[in-house]
Image (tube, rainbow, N blue to C red):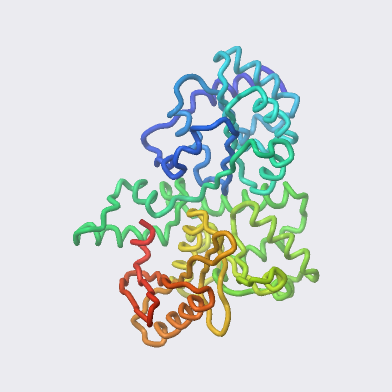
Amino acid sequence: MNKDLLTDVVVEQHRVAWTDEYTPRLENFAGELITGEYAVVVSGIRRCGKSILLQEVRSKIVGESFYLNFEDDRLVQFELSDFQVLLEIWIGLYGDSKIVFFDEIQNVHGWERFVRRLVDQKYKIYITGSNANLLSRDLGTHLTGRYIQLELFPLSFKEFLSFHHSTQDYHGTNNRVRIKKAFQEYMQQGGFPQYLKSQNNDYLTALYESILYRDILARNRLFNDKQIKDMLYYIASNIGKEFSFSALGRLIGIKHTETIKDYLHLIQNTYLAFVVPQYHDSLRKQLFSPKKIYLIDTALARSLGFRISEDLGRMLENIVFIELLRRKCEVYYHKGKRECDFVTREGVHVCQAIQVTLSLRNTETKRREVEGMQEAMDHYDLDVGLIITEDEDDKIQIGNKTINVVSIWKWLL
């Protein structure tokens, strides 16, 4: 590309910096982003705050660093051969720094080769991207064992409170009332920072279309947008409900289940939605059992899906699922004679069983949730289970097993 234009972009972007108006998120990674000689890869859905996180890291580093965001439309013609020119521009303008930040670098074909060269030359590299598979596949080929990959999600409830400069202390009547009210807002508004500022639904529509057309269709050279749109509409309208590949295919007019699987894989790579398998010790049974699906954000789910009611129970379930991903859990659901919403696994063992429900005040609801939890606890030999509700706390003792009932806003904090 034109060197003068590239220089203009470099100079302009170099001025971008962290300010106190942003919500700090670095503490979630416990120093992983600052220390070590390995390359750091931060992946996550568009607009969740990856660029801001890079600026937060830059603000903690002593000395000069280089930064370039490839989402800039002036860099559309940027090619692999331009990286050397870019490095020369940086060194000429700002000296020989060994710390480099690349934002949305997957837009450049062959980028991993240049990054490998920099890592070989002892540069500390930070990379962000919006496609999980693309980043890990490319880096796995050229930087095996020399990078760590971290995932960033839209704001958690704790970060939502920080965003609004609200207390996380729920002790005392006034604090508790404020936090409960804040959680109701969080369930409605989700965690995309820019949407929280604007409250403009057009923002969510634009975000969805950017993911659909750029990250799914264009990147994978797909041309039938109606099938993908119908699939996303189904996903957003059926959060937490079981489905099979064949049934979904019949619903949206796709004959081959492999096509359904491929489309879902592409959607998951953008972090827009997540497929959750039923837990089985047999991998074959797990592969062929019905799945569940959740969306990255409740505000997006409300914006994209069809509902005849608030469906608050499903929204709570979606929030719990995304929080489990934030906590780096490996998540499944349990289904026997009864059902348990989530079980999580560490190594080869299931270590946690979780039910999510609005309330246990209804006798039939309590019976269903407790029986499902009991079955899961017995099946996986667990002594303790967890039922997450909207605003109830309790402890249920059944023989030598304990089921803790916790308000979701407490659990999230």
Closer to the camera, 294 or 226? Answer: 294
Q: Position of residue 106 (x, y in %)?
A: 67, 39
Looking at the picture, tell me which residue is in the foreground, 326 or 181. 326
Identity of the residue drawn at 30% across and 52% down: 168
Q: Which quarter of the rendered picture does the C terminus lie within?
A: bottom left
In the visual, does 36 lie left or right of 106?
left
Q: Is residue 18 above or below residue 159?
A: above
Q: Is 7 rendered above or below residue 153?
A: above
Looking at the image, residue 326 sits to the left or right of residue 284; the answer is left
At x 80% / y 71%, what residue is drawn? 255
At 66% across and 57% down in the image, what residue appears? 267
Q: Residue at x 49, y 59 (%)?
A: 324
In the image, farthest residue toward the bottom: 364
Pinpoint residue 400: horizontal percent, then vertical percent: 38, 78
Query: How many labels sit on residues?
Result: 0
Above or below for 201 versus 308: above
Judge from the rendering whether residue 218 lies leftward or rightward of residue 350; answer left or right: right
**Residue 345: percent from the left, percent from the top?**
55, 63
- The vertical placement of 277 against 368, above or below, is above
Front-lying residue, 337 or 94: 337
Q: Position of residue 283 (x, y in %)?
A: 69, 68
Which quadrant: the N terminus? top right
